[in-house]
Amino acid sequence: MEKNQYKLCLEVLRRFNKAGILDRLILIGSWCLYFYKDYFKKTPYIDIAAIKTRDIDFLVPTPLKIRKSVDVPELLKDLGFVTDFKGSKGYIKLDHPDLILEFLVPEKGRGTDQPYKLPQLGLNATSLRFLSFLTDNVMRVKVEDFYLNVPHPANFALHKLIIFQRRAREHKALKDKNTAIEILKALRNKGEDHIIKKTLDAIPQKWKNKVVKGLEGEDINL
């Protein structure tokens, strides 16, 4: 991970915390791997120095409950983040040479191809399937003098096994799959097979089938 990326990520988190919105967000995606490092500090784990990604994804549980509205694009503007639009529907992302911030919400019902408006944050978010799985078991990790919400590693790994099969780009699919397997192995080395099983048993059968399919040909059984 590049030093500049890490420093910028921390500054974003500090500002979100000071603005009173960090505790309403859940960090998801590859940056979780860095913030899991203390959870696995006594267990063989992924080489976090090798993590290379510009994307920082924040999951916004809905309905969003915050005390006061915060204009996120304005909050980060002086850091060099530029408001950009993803696709033609109006999804907003915040672009910086070192990082890209995106905000996601769980897709509900039949779904929609329209952005989910978050006027309290000055943003439009993208709705995606399976994200509710990441809100089912959230843990808080300490960062400096504040706390960050992240999915439990078991939820993170099993979610990756589902979504990698939906990836259009093969290299991203393979990356997601390999990451999921490494996290599951780390959990097993930590003696948390029971947590993996409990998490797997709690999801719908269709999702469970996708997890099992995602592990076909691998030397790990759930």
Image: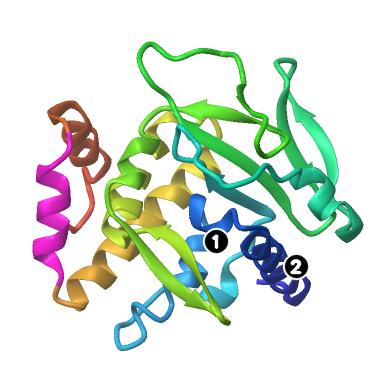
Tell me where residue 206 sits by quadrant. top left
List x then y, in percent, for residue 73.
80, 44
Q: Say whether residue 150 is left or right of residue 125.
A: left
List x then y, in percent, for residue 15.
71, 63
Magenta span main SS:
helix
Mark found first going from the N terminus, 1 or 2 = 2
**For this rendering, which residue is in front, 121 or 40?**
121
Mark sitting on residue 8: 2
Under mark 2, the amino acid is Leu
Under mark 1, the amino acid is Trp
Q: Is residue 221 visible?
A: no
**For this rendering, which residue is in front, 51 or 73?**
73
**Residue at 72% of width from left, 72% of height from top?**
2
Q: Say whether residue 196 is left or right of residue 138.
A: left
Residue 137 vertical placement versus 125 (above, below) = below
195 magenta-colored = yes
List x then y, in percent, for residue 176.
44, 49
Q: Secondary structure at mark 1?
A: helix
**Pointer 1 residue:** 31
**Residue at 27% of width from left, 40% of height from top?**
214
- 1 and 2 marks in contact (CB < 8 Å): no
Q: Is residue 92 visible?
A: yes
The stretch of residues the image draws in magenta is 192-203
**Residue at 64% of width from left, 45% of height from top?**
68
Mark 2 neighbour class, 10 Å CA radius: few under 14, some 14 to 19, many 20 or more = some
Residue 194 vertical placement versus 217 (above, below) = below
Q: Quadrant of the N terminus?
A: bottom right
Question: Between marks 1 and 2, how big is the CA–CA gap?
Answer: 13 Å
Q: Say whether residue 171 is left or right of residue 75.
A: left
